[in-house]
Each structure stands twice: as C-alpha cells, then as structure tokens.
Amino acid sequence: MRQHSKTTLGVDVGDRRSHFCVLDEAGAVVERGDFRTTPAGLKKMLAARSGATVAFETGSHALWIRHEVEAAGCRALEGNPRQVRLIYGGHTKNDRLDAENLARLARLDEELLKPVRARRDRDQRDLAGIKARDQLVRARASLANFVRGVIKPFGVRLKKCGVGTLPKRAPEQLPPELKATLHPVLETIADLSRRIRAYDRAIEKVSAERYPVTEHLREVRGVGPLTAMAFVLVIGDPARFPKSRTVGSYVGLRPKQDQSGDRDVPLGITKAGSSLLRRLLLQCAHYMLGPFGTDSDLRRYGERIAARGGKVAKRKAVVAVARKLAVLLHRMWVTGEVYDPLRVSRQRGEVAEETVAVPA
C-alpha cells in the first residue's frame, strides 16, 4: 500500500498555465510557482513529490490531470468548484491565492472541497457521445427557431410541425424571396436529424452491450435508452448514495434553502450536478404528464401538484416528477425490483388490484 506524505499541493488549473502552492506538514508555504497546462508540464512539477496530496478543481482538464497525478505516485483530490465559496466567492481572487486556498482546504478537511468521484475512462468516452448528440439537438433547435423567426417580418408563419419534419414541410411555405437564402439552413437541419438518429442507434447499441441495467430502468414508461444510459453514466456507482432520495439533490432538482429563524424564502432549484441529466429527466417528466403519458404514481403525483392551478404549479409539477423519477431509477437500480407503476396507489387502496399491470 502506497504511503502518502504530509505534503499538500493546491493546483489552480488554467487553460494555458496553472499555478500551484505547496504546504508542508505544519501548513507553511514552502513553494509557489506555475507550469504549462500540459501533461509534460504537470509531470515536471510533480517530480520528486511522490506521496503528496494534490488538490485541484474539476473541469475540462481534470481527466488527464488525475491520470498524471496518480502516475506520479501522488493522491488526486478533485474538488467541486460550485461548492467551495472560499475559491469563487472571495473579494480577493487570483490564481496564486486560489492554489493556496485549495491546498489549505485539502490539508484542513478534504470534505470542505466536496470531492468529486472520478468517472471511469470508458464511461467518460460513452458520456461524450451523449453530450455530442445533445449539442446537435440544440444546434438543430436553434436553426429551426431561426427559420421560424426570420420569415415573420414577411407575414408568414410556419404551420406547427416537429423539427425533424421541418425541412420537408417548410419549403412550400417560405416567402419566394427567402427560399434561396433558407434552403441551405433547411438542408443543415435535415443533415443534423440524420446524424442525431445515427447517435441514437449507437447509444442504444452501447447501452445494451455495456450497461445492461439500463434495460431494467427503461421499464418506466417515458424513460428511453438515452436517459437510462445518461443516468447510469452520471451516477456511476449507485452505492455511493446511502439513500435514494439524495439523488434528486445530486442532479440539482432540490429547491434551494434560505432559512433563518422564522424567515424561509422560497427559491428555485439548485441546478447542481449534470445539466444534461437534469434536462433529460425533465423531458421524461414532461412526457409522463403529457397526453401520451400512462397512468402511474408519478403522473398522479404530478397532477395533484398541477391541480393547484396556474403555470407555476405546472412547472413545479414537472420538476417534482423529475426529482421523484431520479429517486425511483436509483431505487430500481439498487434493489433490482420489478417496476410497478401504481404500487403506491395500490397500497393506498386507490386502484383495484387487478388493474395493476406489472411487467414480467
């Protein structure tokens, strides 16, 4: 078992150059400096520091930094920048001070950094495919909105249709003077749709081959291979959540709190964690509460909240259903239980026993 020294390094990672601060066992600064943000630069800085604890914030460089730190015989401590106010919320903020603060937090109590759990390389690659698809979807939506908006000054409004069918239905509705201008945009939308479908096929194949648990999670009506695989990849190890209810907070679907004495200010959700997974869960919630959603405990729960009236109540219903869906998926993953869409309603006597359809 590798022995770690009492030396602590804080590294403030920059895109081109990174600053570091070294603390000894007593907490005194023994060295400061910077290095090029490259594997070679980091390797040179870590030379002769085997066994040290290296604290840095998670980010786009975190994957290779963690590999280099561990290869140098050091211990990598990857902190969550959104949770460390001392780093991003101070009145005096610079790279040298950030590096020192990271080192001191790691030396005092590692939990102050809210350490991020490292994702496996394979999972990181597969998640990159989901993120690439998401970027194409957002680009396609942006182009479709552009087409709809740019023709309005000419007195034309496109008939309602899906983004995927827009390239086929839009040409005959376009103003004659804009057809040549918008034709390449419509072709690009069609090409993006083809590429998105290719990603969907690849994701479904990878999901079935590498992450068989996603098949179980897809028993929930409204959860497809994309959401199931994203959930498995973002969560990683389900055992790190002792209670399933904490998963809702992890994906940023828990309301913020600002309470002091009798003062309790209502706030929006935290939006912490993966924005991609949160967006997918919200899309599933929209489907479950929509016209194509089937009867289930989740739908009934959302309908009770939406019944309070108004657009705000409907938005709250979608968020609440998404949060409960995250908890449900984690619970199914951990226990392996067969999904019963009306289990709670049946226990309350709100539905007849024979009407409950439990998948075989």
Image: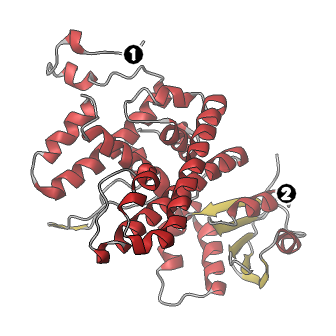
- In the depicted structure, whether residue 256 falls above or below residue 347: below
The residue located at (16%, 53%) in the rendering is 313
Q: Which residue is mark 2?
A: 71
Residue 114: % across, % down = 53, 60
- Secondary element under disc 1, as helix, strand or loop, is loop
Q: Which residue is mark 1?
A: 359
Q: Amino acid at mark 2?
A: Ala
Q: Nearer the viewer, residue 176 or 146?
A: 176
Kindly identify which numbered label has been placed on residue 66: none
Residue 251 visible to an observer of this rendering? no
Judge depth for marks 1 and 2 and give the one in front.
Answer: 1
| Label located before the other in sequence (1 or 2) | 2
Mark 1 Cα-neighbour bin, 10 Å: few <14, some 14–19, many ≥20: few
Q: Amino acid at mark 1?
A: Pro
The residue located at (70%, 81%) in the rendering is 28
Mark 2 Cα-neighbour bin, 10 Å: few <14, some 14–19, many ≥20: few
